[in-house]
Amino acid sequence: MRAAALYSAAGSLLLTTLAAAPAGGAARVAGAAAVPGAAELRGTAVAAARARAAGIDFGACSAADVPQEPGSDVRCGTVTVPLDYAHPGGPQIRLTVSRIPATQKDPRNSKRKVPRQGALVYNPGGPGASGMYFPLIGKVPQWQRIAAAYDLVGYAPRGVGRSAPLSCEDPERFVKAPTASPTHPTEAYKRQRIAQAKAYARGCARRSGSKLRFYTSLNNARDLDVLRAALGEDRLTFVGASYGTYFGALYATMFPTHVRRMVLDSAVNPDPAKVWYRNNLDQSAAFEDRWADFRDWIARHDDVYKLGKTAEKVQRAYDTARERLAGKAAGGKVGPGQLQNAFLMAGYYDDFWPSRAEALSAYLHGDPKPLVRLAAPNAETAAEAENGSAVYTAVECNDAPWPTDWKTWDRDNTRLARSAPFETWDNAWMNLPCAYWPAPRRQPLDVRTGPGELPPVLILAAERDAAAPYPGALEMNRRPAGSVPVTERDAGTHGIGGGPNPCVNGHLDTYLLQGRVPARHASCAPHRLPPAAGPAKEPRRGSMRGGRR
């Protein structure tokens, strides 16, 4: 389910714990029985104290982190965290961090100086997506007021990019194409995918060894606290999107007195019974609804795309393309699997709708070039894609129990595919390595805080979000006491903060700049859907692959 980022004698431990605690309160040590890993909690305090003392030495970014652009003031550094927080003096790993300092210039009045409010840390989700590019968003008009008040900080979570990177197989094999994507797979095809899932799980273990078990959402939350300390912040201002909302909520549960402000954008369902197997089934069902929205939009623009005047006719056009590609791959690289993956992105972001519709239309009318440009694997990004998939798999498989009997997977996905064929089986194959995972599974933490334990949390959600279905946002809202949701009605873009909806952005600005949340559940009208004509927009997002948050 995918988008698109980490040291001891008793006396010194007490001192470092006190040093790591922000003014006004300590980490939830006294209530450690309610939070898994008292040893890890103490280890986090030790690592945070060391990180605060060391700080982050920001300098020029490498091209592998953030390509430098003329006039860019983004700077990069690293923060050191323990691989295993239960043993903070053991092996260490380094997380890459990027930052652009607050401009302190009011974009509406260049003569007015804006007070700096500290660092704002962002995670785009995944698991497996990097936030290293995030500081550059301060140039976008919707983010300029926030960029005036905050240092914009991005980072690559453990396992991602150069942050102790994970890998499970050769990148060239990972992007091998063309591939199949049957909506109702045969028994022979299922056996083939089972064998691939087992091989993938073995590859993760072989390439990572005993380190594999330490790539978890709980450790992502602990890493976030060490990053907070390294930035010199007593309390964290955090924006998490998609999967970032889950470990953001874990952070709030584990370190409530360390939170200053927190935005959970496109919240996933944190119910322990849903993490992660059931969440993936819910996601596949939601993608079917969003796929229907897209087909309706194409049908309304039949004068442009000539794919049919009803959603049913558009579906037949798509099925025709799948059948043709199964017989002969476009450009030798685009088969049904690549087609499905390209169109899955339209389920995440409606600003991708024109490019997908145009490519499908051109292909069916004799020109495969737009589809090949859109859907063919890119050898230059193969390593990044494989790395993201490895981190995604490791975190989700480690986080929670998964069914280990293939019959359970077969039963649940066969049943769901009857009503939601678009994404169901591809999502199942993405996650099937978890059935054969070689590392220990954990029980998910029950995310929640009581009244007064946490500052108000702002939750952003779109009603028709497929990657993070809306019921998950409602469940998230029930857990941190004092949280308030903002809903974009009848819209389905995944990640709505700082996007095209001025109503949503008004709530985001008010919260981050003034600390105020709506008095009650707020509602915004949907943003405008993209026009059928004109240049297709392909904004850079957190890397999202089929089934990924």
Image (tube, helix red, strand yellow):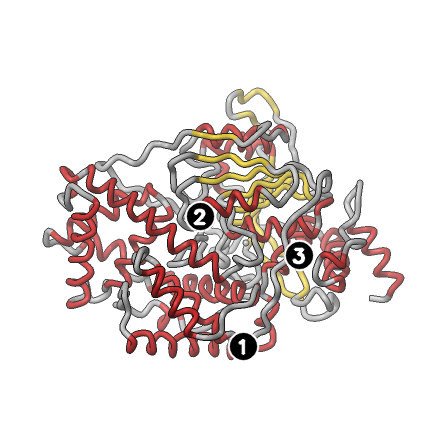
Tell me the kind of residue under disc 3.
Arg
Residues marked 1 and 3 touching at CB (< 8 Å): no
Q: Is residue 148 visible?
A: yes
In the image, residue 124 above or below residue 398: above
Q: Residue at x 54, y 54 (%)?
A: 5
Q: Which mark is residue 222?
A: 3
Q: Residue furthest left?
A: 366
Sequence-wise, which precedes: disc 2 or disc 3?
3
Q: Can you give x and y, in whole percent of width and height, for residue 377 in the image?
A: 30, 62
Label 3 element class: helix
Q: Along the line of sight, which residue is nearer the eye, 434 or 51?
A: 434
Count of number-bearing discs: 3
**In the displayed structure image, the side of residue 332 where residue 497 appears, left or right:** right
Sequence-wise, which precedes: disc 1 or disc 2?
1
In the image, residue 269 above or below residue 497: below
Q: Can you give x and y, in whole percent of width and height, for residue 547 in the image?
A: 40, 58
Tell me the residue that label 2 is attached to.
Answer: 469
Q: Which mark is residue 438?
A: 1
Q: Is residue 152 visible?
A: no
Which class describes the residues within 10 Å of circle 1: few (<14), some (14-19), or many (20+)? Answer: some
**In the displayed structure image, the side of residue 288 where residue 84 appears, left or right:** right
